[in-house]
Amino acid sequence: MTDMLVNLYNLKEDWSALSPANSSGVIIRKPIAPEKFLILQWVRENFSEAWASEVDMAFSRSPVSCFIAQQDKKMAGFACYDATSLGYFGPTGVAEIMRGKGIGKALLLACLLDMKLKGYGYAIIGSIGPQKFYEKTVGATVIPGSTPGIWKDWLCEE
């Protein structure tokens, strides 16, 4: 799958974009260390072992380079950056029953704004899924020749 590029220096520093998710009782925040294994387990069970590995890497960053969405003290979604490679957004996922509530958008914007505050000028969205979503939400553009990207030689179970 292809990668996309996001221009962070034109991204509006507007944290209120996280509030649509909050209106449904969902909180977007950075996790703390004692939550690591609960989050890894949730990602493993709802998405994949590979994504759990990337979340584990995001926890090794200081500060942690991921955000979670929670509702009533339960996981609703997550998003990471600087996990697979520096400057990359992802992986990200929202619980199936929580989709369509703006949580994915809020998690994406939280990560990208955090990257911007750290001094990144651009972010790469690796191996994109919903291309139109990223184009509309943050003005991401396809990076020509980026397939298969950084994952071309990775070890994986198929």
Image: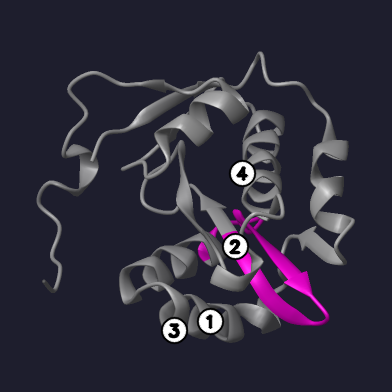
Q: Earlier in the sequence, mark 3 or mark 2?
A: 3
In the rendered structure, which amino acid carries the disc numbered 4? Leu
Look at the picture and state if 48 lies above or below 30.
below
In the rendered structure, which amino acid carries the disc numbered 1? Trp
- Measured in 3D between alpha carbons, the distance from the residue under mark 1 to the one under mark 2, in whole angstroms, is 10 Å
In which quadrant of the rendered view does residue 11 lie?
top right
Which residue does the numbered mark 2 point to in the structure image?
78
In the image, 70 versus 9, the foreground residue is 70
Which circle marks residue 108 in the picture?
4
In the rendered structure, which amino acid carries the disc numbered 2? Phe
Residue found 48% across the figure and 75% down from its top = 43
Element at label 4:
helix
Magenta residues span 60-78
Q: Are marks 1 and 2 in contact (CB under 8 Å)?
A: yes
Rendering coords of residue 67 (x, y %): 66, 58
Q: Are marks 3 and 1 in contact (CB under 8 Å)?
A: yes
